[in-house]
Structures are given as C-alpha cells and as structure tokens.
Image (cartoon, helix red, strand yellow):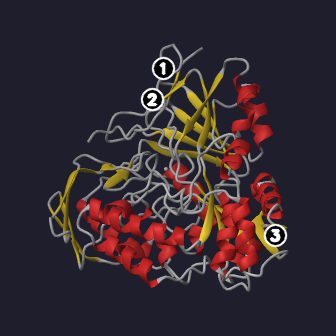
C-alpha cells in the first residue's frame, strides 16, 4: 500500500468534519483593519478537530499538520499555502540536472525551542529516521533516497533514481527535523525550531502556542495563539459573536451574513485541495459497468452542490487547481440527466438501488443532494451514515461498500489512483505507469504533463465522481492581519498573524 495508508485515512476524513528569512508566511490575508499591532496580543482561533496526541512522527491526522507544521516543526524546505516550495531551515538548495543530487545549505545559528543547537548531524539523523522507521508518517516517500550526508553546513541527498516529489515530501512530515537523542515525550510535548513553542494543552478544549523567544528568524508578531476546538458551526458562530474567538476556520459560508452583521468579522474565501470524492467500488455488480458510473456522474448537478455549500468550485477530475497536472475536465461528464437515464437503460440498470456509506460527521447536505439527483434518473440511493471507526474498517480497510463520499484534503495525492490496493478499487496499468513516469521526471513541467495525462484517463474511466473542490472559508476579525486564507485545512502557518485594538 502506498503512503496514503491508514494514518492518511484518518487525516482525510477527520479534518473535513469540518497547510530566506524567518518569515514563513505567504498566502496571508491582506490587512483589513486599522490600528497598531500589539506584540503582546493573544489570538484565539477556532478549529474543528482536536488531535489525539502531538506525536508528529507517528500519529495520524491532518489536525497535527494543520497546527504543528511551520509553527513548531520545520524542515529544510517548506510549502507555501499556494503549494510552492521555498527554503526554510536551508538558506538555499539546488537540484542537479539529472535529478540525482540535492544540496542544501543549512542555516547557521538555529536552535530548538529548548535551546539546543541545530547541527548538520541532526538533519542527517532525522531524515534517516524518516526513511527507515516504518511506523513514522510518510516513511516510504523517501524510498528513492540512496544516501544523506553532511559536509560542514552542506547537506547532500543522493538519489537511487530521480524523484520529482522529493522536495514536496521534504516539506511535509517526512522532512521534519528533530534533535538527535532528544528525550521529549512527543505525545504531550514538542521541541522544534519554529516561531512558536507549545505552551499548554487542555484536552477537550484548547491548545496554546507561545512565541518562541529563541527563534532563529524574526519574532512572531503575537505573544500567543490559542486554538479553541469547537466542532459545531453554530457554536463557533456564537463564540465569535460573544467575542471569544478572533478567527473562525472551517466556517459555513452560508452563515456569512450573520457573522459579518456587526462589522467585527470579514469572511474570506481561499483555495484548497479539498476534494469531495464520490468513490465507486468497481467490484460491485452494477458499478463495474462504466456506463453506470458515467450515469451517476452525469446525474449529479455539481453547480447546485456549490450553491448549496455557499463556496467552492466544481471539479471533474482527481487533481484540483492548486496541484500539478490540473486540467478542466468538465466536458468529460457534464450534467445531463437525460443522458444518464439512457446509459442506465443501455446497461440494464434501470430502477437499481445502491448504498452510500458516509462518515456521519459530514452532515446531511451532500447526501440529500445525491439522493435527490440519483433518484431523478431512476437510482434509489440508501444512505448509511456511520461513525468514523466503522467507515475506516468497512470502507477503507475491507472495501466493503458500494458508494462512499469522502472529503480528501491532502495535496498532491494522485498516487492513490495509481494504487490498485487503495479503497478506490481502481486498477489501470497505464495510469500507474504515467504516475511512475511523473515521479521519475527531472523537471516539474514533465512531471505535471504525465499527471495531466493520467488524470484525464481516470476521469474518462469514470473511476469516481469529484462532487466539488472545497473552498477554504475563514471568518477573520477586522483587527487581525496576516491570517492565511488558502489551504488552511492542511497547514495553518501563523508566523505573520498580528492583532491590534479596534
């Protein structure tokens, strides 16, 4: 099984029940209010899902990446909210033309939160651990790394074969740099090189980050950030109206007028890689027929979905706009109920019944739309809303499902379509080869071109339906500046966030 393993499954579902200097911002919302930022301010941010523990090495869940990456833990490189790769603990990096050698210049004067110095040996050890510890997150993403060596402040990574995804992987958990020999209890503590340190964790309530006074770059602009975990949108709205939170992420765009009514908040829409995916089990009696899968896709009114959600955009293939290889594939399966009925008749599938297994944390909007749209073409859809452990066991592990809706939040996760063992049950050797060709490409353009070809095949095979590409919906206090707006479900880089008195 590829790296989107059981751990990644937790990440893709749980977050949605709802990523040269010390500056690690990018994609932040421009100033919306007046006033002088207060360096001693505390900013309260509503988040949806609380992590089960804080072990960035081994614990599943995008809830950890969302708050810990960039803020507490860093790598040689980082990704911006717009999904670009930039230097972080490395002041510069280079890749050889053949894609087999990467050199990084490690910054001088970097320390961990506890004051220990970052050394080249720490970098080599950390990356080696990420590569060989099978229980660590994204371990096999470094499978093509042959060796990691340090010569002074120069770190050299030598590849056994080119891997166009290496820098991207190093900007995630596989690239987190830890202190060699550290005795930290990673489940409840943290010791990174970022602009914030872990202050306290009130389990079931909040996590507080404090400014890291030992940070190697420019100091964070607020004294502390408090993540308040409020799963319910109405409760989050109430907290905002009571002045208890400064920012509300994972917000319901349909509540925009209410939260903006008194002028204290502005709702900001950003882009994301969230993909509302209707998986179709191709081993099912009816769904193994491409005509039935196409009929399902053409029965769904994607524009109506966006209107119901109040935000987002249509998506007709497995790669969203922020990811390499994106192409507008709306012509592949346009909304056409009449064509859907004709396809079902040709397949002898008129009047069939299918079951939709869905995590109950997603609410009822999407299931209701699917039931209505499929019923209109003659398919009876029965909805089975289940607890996450049940979904994980039945759908993800055992592939015991017919249809299932999941909001896949991870960026650059096309590899799932190249993995026949993944719960999608999609198996196309041409797609698998194109994905491997993409990985082995020595230029970003070549890699993206291969992914684009593969994504079109997946869509034309009617392997699934991509119901929508979710927007990043954030309600930001008008006295808050520097709040990221893109990909906040994945990474919430708070280096630039600031607060002033209204």
Q: Is residue 313 at all visible to an observer of this figure? A: yes
Q: Are marks 3 and 2 in contact (CB under 8 Å)?
A: no
Asked which quadrant contains residue 17, the reply is bottom right
* Distance in Å between CA atoms under marks 1 and 3: 57 Å
- Residue positioned 67% across, 62% down in the render: 298
* Position in image of residue 236 (x %, y %): 74, 37
* Distance in Å between CA atoms under marks 3 and 2: 55 Å
Asked which quadrant contains residue 178, the reply is bottom left
Q: Earlier in the sequence, mark 1 or mark 2?
A: 1
List the residue tagged with mark 1. 37
- Residue positioned 51% across, 82% down in the render: 1
- Residue positioned 53% across, 52% down in the render: 490
List the residue tagged with mark 3. 379
Q: Which mark is residue 221?
A: 2
* Position in image of residue 164 (x %, y %): 30, 66
Determine the secondary structure under disc 2: loop
- Estimate how packed mark 2 is, as few (under 14), some (14 to 19) or many (20 or more) residues with alpha carbons within 10 Å: many
Q: What is the tally of numbered marks visible in this picture?
A: 3
* Distance in Å between CA atoms under marks 1 and 2: 8 Å
Q: Is residue 88 at all visible to an observer of this figure? A: no
Q: Earlier in the sequence, mark 3 or mark 2?
A: 2
Determine the secondary structure under disc 1: loop
- Estimate how packed mark 1 is, as few (under 14), some (14 to 19) or many (20 or more) residues with alpha carbons within 10 Å: some
Residue 237 versus residue 79 in the image, above or below:
above
Q: Earlier in the sequence, mark 1 or mark 3?
A: 1
* Position in image of residue 249 (x %, y %): 63, 40
Q: Is 350 on the left or on the right of 499, as rendered?
A: right
* Position in image of residue 108 (x %, y %): 22, 48
Instruction: Tell me the quadrant of the picture where the C terminus can be found.
Output: top right
Judging depth in this view, the residue of 441 and 154 nearest the camera is 441
């Amino acid at each position: 099984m590829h790296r989107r393993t059981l751990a990644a499954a937790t990440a893709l579902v749980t977050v949605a029940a709802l990523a040269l200097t010390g500056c690690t911002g990018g994609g932040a919302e421009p100033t919306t209010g007046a006033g002088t930022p207060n360096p001693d301010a505390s900013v309260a941010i509503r988040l949806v899902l609380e992590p089960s523990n804080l072990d960035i090495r081994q614990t599943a869940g995008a809830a950890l990446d969302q708050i810990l990456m960039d803020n507490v833990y860093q790598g040689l490189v980082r990704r911006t909210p717009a999904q670009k790769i930039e230097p972080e603990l490395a002041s510069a990096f280079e890749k050889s033309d053949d894609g087999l050698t990467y050199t990084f210049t490690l910054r001088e004067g970097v320390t961990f939160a506890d004051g220990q110095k970052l050394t080249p040996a720490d970098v080599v050890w950390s990356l080696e651990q990420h590569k060989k510890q099978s229980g660590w997150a994204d371990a096999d993403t470094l499978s093509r790394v042959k060796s990691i060596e340090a010569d002074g402040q120069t770190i050299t990574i030598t590849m056994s074969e080119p891997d166009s995804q290496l820098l991207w992987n190093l900007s995630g958990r596989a690239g987190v740099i830890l202190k060699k020999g550290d005795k930290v209890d990673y489940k409840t503590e943290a010791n990174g090189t970022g602009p914030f340190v872990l202050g306290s964790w009130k389990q079931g309530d909040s996590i507080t980050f404090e400014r890291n006074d030992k940070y190697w770059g420019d100091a964070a602009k607020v004294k502390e950030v408090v993540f308040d975990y409020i799963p319910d949108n109405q409760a989050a709205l109430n907290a905002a109206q009571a002045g208890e939170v400064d920012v509300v992420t994972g917000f319901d765009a349909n509540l925009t007028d209410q939260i903006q009514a008194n002028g204290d908040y502005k709702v900001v829409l950003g882009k994301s890689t969230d993909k509302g995916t209707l998986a179709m089990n191709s081993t099912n009696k009816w769904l193994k027929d491409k005509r039935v899968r196409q009929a399902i896709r053409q029965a769904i009114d994607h524009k109506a979905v966006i209107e119901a959600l109040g935000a987002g955009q249509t998506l007709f293939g497995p790669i969203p706009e922020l990811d390499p290889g994106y192409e507008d594939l709306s012509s592949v399966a346009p909304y056409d109920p009449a064509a859907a009925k004709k396809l079902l008749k040709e397949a002898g599938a008129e009047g069939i019944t299918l079951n939709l297994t869905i995590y109950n944390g997603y609410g009822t909007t999407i299931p209701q739309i699917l039931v209505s749209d499929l019923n209109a073409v003659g398919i009876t859809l029965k909805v089975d809303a289940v607890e996450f452990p049940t979904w994980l066991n039945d759908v993800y592990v055992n592939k015991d499902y017919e249809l299932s809706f999941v909001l896949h939040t991870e960026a650059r996760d096309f590899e799932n379509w190249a993995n026949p063992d993944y719960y999608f049950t999609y198996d196309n050797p041409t797609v698998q080869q194109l994905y491997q060709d993409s990985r082995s490409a020595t230029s970003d353009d070549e890699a993206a071109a291969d992914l684009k070809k593969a994504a079109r095949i997946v869509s034309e095979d009617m392997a699934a339906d991509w119901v929508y590409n979710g927007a990043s919906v954030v309600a930001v206090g008008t006295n808050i500046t520097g709040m990221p707006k893109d990909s906040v479900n994945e990474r919430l880089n708070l280096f630039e966030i600031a607060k002033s008195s209204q």
